Image (spheres, coloured by chain):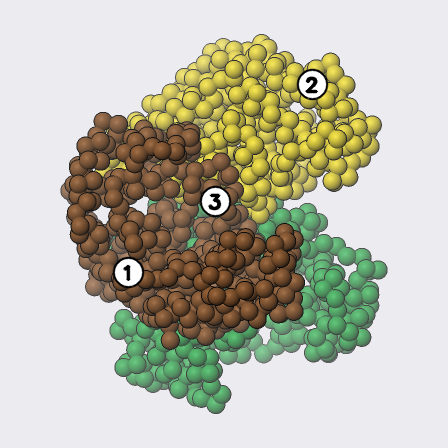
Chain colours: A brown, B yellow, C green
Amino acid sequence: MIATKSSPIDQLCAQLDEIVLIDPHSHINPHAAASKNLGDILGYHYFTELAHSAGMPREVIEAPGITAKEKVGRIVEGLAHLDNTIQVKWLIELCERFFGFQDDRLTPDNWEALYDHSEKLMSAPDWEQTVLQKSQLEAVFLTNDFDDPLTGFDTKKYIPCLRTDDLVFHLQKPEVRQRLAKATGFDCATPAKLIHAIGQLFTHFVSHGAKACAISLPPDFEPTPVSHVDAEGPLRAAYAGHVLTTEQSQILSRFVFWTIAEFCSEHHLPFDLMIGVNRRVYESGVYQGQDLFDQRVSLYQYRRLFNAFPRVKFPISVLAHASNMELVSYAWIFPNVIANGHWWYSNIPAFIEPDCRSRLEAIPRNKNIGYYSDMYKLEFGWPKFQMYRRVLAKVLFEDFVVGRHWSEERAVELGRQILRGNVETIFSGAC
Amino acid sequence: MIATKSSPIDQLCAQLDEIVLIDPHSHINPHAAASKNLGDILGYHYFTELAHSAGMPREVIEAPGITAKEKVGRIVEGLAHLDNTIQVKWLIELCERFFGFQDDRLTPDNWEALYDHSEKLMSAPDWEQTVLQKSQLEAVFLTNDFDDPLTGFDTKKYIPCLRTDDLVFHLQKPEVRQRLAKATGFDCATPAKLIHAIGQLFTHFVSHGAKACAISLPPDFEPTPVSHVDAEGPLRAAYAGHVLTTEQSQILSRFVFWTIAEFCSEHHLPFDLMIGVNRRVYESGVYQGQDLFDQRVSLYQYRRLFNAFPRVKFPISVLAHASNMELVSYAWIFPNVIANGHWWYSNIPAFIEPDCRSRLEAIPRNKNIGYYSDMYKLEFGWPKFQMYRRVLAKVLFEDFVVGRHWSEERAVELGRQILRGNVETIFSGAC
Amino acid sequence: MIATKSSPIDQLCAQLDEIVLIDPHSHINPHAAASKNLGDILGYHYFTELAHSAGMPREVIEAPGITAKEKVGRIVEGLAHLDNTIQVKWLIELCERFFGFQDDRLTPDNWEALYDHSEKLMSAPDWEQTVLQKSQLEAVFLTNDFDDPLTGFDTKKYIPCLRTDDLVFHLQKPEVRQRLAKATGFDCATPAKLIHAIGQLFTHFVSHGAKACAISLPPDFEPTPVSHVDAEGPLRAAYAGHVLTTEQSQILSRFVFWTIAEFCSEHHLPFDLMIGVNRRVYESGVYQGQDLFDQRVSLYQYRRLFNAFPRVKFPISVLAHASNMELVSYAWIFPNVIANGHWWYSNIPAFIEPDCRSRLEAIPRNKNIGYYSDMYKLEFGWPKFQMYRRVLAKVLFEDFVVGRHWSEERAVELGRQILRGNVETIFSGAC
């Protein structure tokens, strides 16, 4: 494999590896950013859901009361069925890089030694810093609940992002309304009050350095403006604790969504749209392993939004690989549509490569955010970005260095903009 | 081409070629499994429909009363327009392997010699066995009508599979009801009686070694449970010979489908779903060359089914290439969803390669059935599997040997599981 | 890059480069086919819309009263954000070939010299002929308005094609009705009169050497026959100047469309269908940069049409890459469905390569039109066809020379048919 290692693609990749990154989307908890033990790592939903899919009962994986170590031992039993997956490749590369793991598989025979060894390393007081450094990560975007106080961490390193799913889709849940009331001091039973409260949340987030607003959306969502008059009935019904009809829910969701877009415009906050997920499709799935999608979705559903908010940047992620071509085309035409990373079920090289290729060929280079980690624990940043960098290096080499006779330097410069530069210019901060 | 022949991909492919196969889906008639002459081979719908599409009138191809030899002569006239197609590649490779054919094209000048020579070979009493042996085929799954007596052949070699299209979609046809009555001794005009009759069919099939149940489904089908009360009206109407409304038809189809799934659960039979075909779209097409599809379909339509029958394995084939990504994702999450082969219009290397790549990257390796032949005559097993093996070898080499530094041995082992091992474990037999 | 230049793919491409072409679809104005200055070239919507998408205000690009030179200077300011796009590659290659441009980028520093130099070249009286010759273009299909007199140009070199969008979708606009009345001498307020008038247009076009009829269609269009009785109301309403309901508009569009298909059948004119565009999705976009699409479309919507007009050839272009697989499958089955080029948002190598690959594997070779330029000015023919030829050479080499051991000669012959031969046989002229 020596020969492969020194291929021109590898050489180009090595230059991309040196770029210090800002990760524009993650689910990191800034109060516990790094893992404490292998349980945090093998507990990532990719491993539990794949082990479950391969035949391990949920009761085994999620047995109440088992220790982290017991859980790891159990999931390792299922890894033999998964060693082909790219997700297990993340795991092995992560263990190599951070724990000096040298085997090519994690097995019932070797996991315990790794567990103990890695736990020691992770208990170092500077472990979090070590991981950031070894991962070339300068800063990481968070995905914060709307009522997050945003205190107790360095918001330059862990950049707040206002997650709005609960506001848009779950206002009928009493606990969401209570959290909103607590966060804002407001009863929000009328459109005017709700707008005021949402405005407070924006002020709070912006004053704490938030650089984006984000939401994940089901395939059938179609944003439109909703008048106060039309929103009032559904909103009052929700606050009265009634069960809303499907139509009422839609009206309320659209009203809140449009209101959020208006505040994004006011505060110059980019609005990350993650389009296409159906929640709880597999109800007996493991934790975070229950969501899927319906590929019958179109960015055409968002035309009114893109037209109505020319000042709001919309970095867009699509769940279905089939949606990539629309994303390329809409980003090619709409100044405020930005292609953003490779999300979840699309986040495997088989889909990333053609998606990356088309984005580089047809989207202005300043509107293409190559990748984000989507990680819950810092250790995953490195192997996930590494997967992307390899694909990016391949496309840059084949399409630009060979296909267009670009110098390697020029190709790397394009890579740098995709990987890092655009994150800075697009999420340049609220004002 | 010597250099190409000995490429690392070819070397890896050569190892895959040695794997003895069980073909998990075909339309073989076990009483006449092999071809008798080139007419059986060139009569395969791929050649007649492509010749027709390229300009040959149906009346020429399907003229009543012409001999097999005349028919071959006519279709050969159309092959010049088709020599680029992968289907003609199957034909040439098949003729090379089984008949020693040495030209690179079948033409009006050379076909007759081949016809006569091959007919002699095919008349050998052990021809069927020769084909199986040269094709490395140990056993072949059938697709049997529900009223097939399943006698007169070796069910270890030709494995029965209960095809349920007629029961689910054609119970309004008098001949289907008559066949059902004859097969079960039952008038099935009430839900309870129909269930009982279907149960008898399952008992019959299972007792004759059936290892799967199968059905092909239109893009708009959405399975749901239907109560006896709701099913009774449509069922009685069908048995009274009335023309059903679209809604009645749907209710009846869903009722029968759900009933079959219940029996699959009871008997631990996998239920092959072949999703997405519209029948008789081109009504003037040649025999078996009339069906197409509408890509606007989603596995989301099957969420209730997958949730309701956790014990039933659903090996799923999708007709539209665009559906592959959903199949990968659903198989990644649902333990009972299995990716199954490359069906019909998706069964060309241009689609197989990206589909194979993504399946190997994200589906647990024990839930990925690489390929089935879908053949009507045994001779097609070899060239069709050969097409798949080449693609598989390419993906294994590029993504695993080069991309992940796997040993060739480890890559071949993965290939073996995809090609053979999973067929055995997934269709392990009813109980 | 020397090594790359002389690769086997390049050698094969060099042979394709020598094929003299007939471009089967363009928007050339035969009275001003070539560009007069760089303003005509950089004014192509690809550059204005991408510059706009990358951040340049429309008011800057489309400022009224600016000269061509000022406009070029402005657009060049935006090119730095676009140098990764394939469209800018067209631009650079065009400037190299026709103007001897030697830099690898067009910048604020070098554009003016190019502007002046190229303007001199373009002012030569034989510039148009020079471009055609250097582009290996023998003839170019036009897209003519239905009321085009078709006089004053050589219809052997610039081949008329009847564009029918206005008739099918805009008969409610007074100016369209007036143009129709003027062109035919007819008030068309009844179905019979409208049919008669459309018949006159066909006679006019056919007598002036038209070889095709063409239309672009929105994703939700579904052609069906409409009776005179059903069409009469909507048609009269349109002619009375009423605003039609959505349903009335649909009926009228379907009636006119079906009528046009009938005349195509009568005159043996191929009917180019360009399926899937939504107009004016981005209403603040630059000129011709406002249209997008909804990928939720199926050729299944056209099944009645394909069945009803077996004598009409339908060369079909699809806007969404996801539609390619349906196109391959429908062209594989329906004798009158022909795959036609790579349209607009699908016209980038990332999509052309997989589309080309699948078309060559599964469509009869006589029903596959490789490429058309869609250009507005002659200078774009060369770089656009060049882009396609490179992809075609790659696929021919990899899949046919290597994959099937074809001789290079045989592969080039297939390429010749795809690039040129089929244009002649499919658009063989009306009778």
* Quarter of the image where one finds residue C50: bottom left
Q: Disc 1 or disc 2, which is closer to the eye? A: 1
> Is label 2 on the same chain as label 3?
no
Marks 2/3: CA–CA distance: 38 Å
| Secondary structure found at label 1 | loop
The numbered mark at residue B197 is: 2
Q: Residue at x 81, y 70 (%)?
A: C236
- For the image, the number of numbered tags is 3
Does A430 sit above or below residue A252? below
Compared across the picture, whether A269 is left or right of A193 comes to left
The residue to which callout 1 is attached is: A153
Mark 1, other Cα within 10 Å: few <14 / some 14–19 / many ≥20: few
Dot 2: chain letter? B
Viewport quadrant of the N terminus of chain B: top left
Marks 3/1: CA–CA distance: 31 Å
Task: Provide residue C344's location: percent of width, then percent of height.
Answer: 49, 63
Amino acid type shown at disc 1? Phe
Task: Provide residue A134's location: percent of width, then percent of height.
Answer: 19, 52
Amino acid type shown at disc 2? Ala
> Is label 1 on the same chain as label 2?
no
Marks 1/2: CA–CA distance: 68 Å
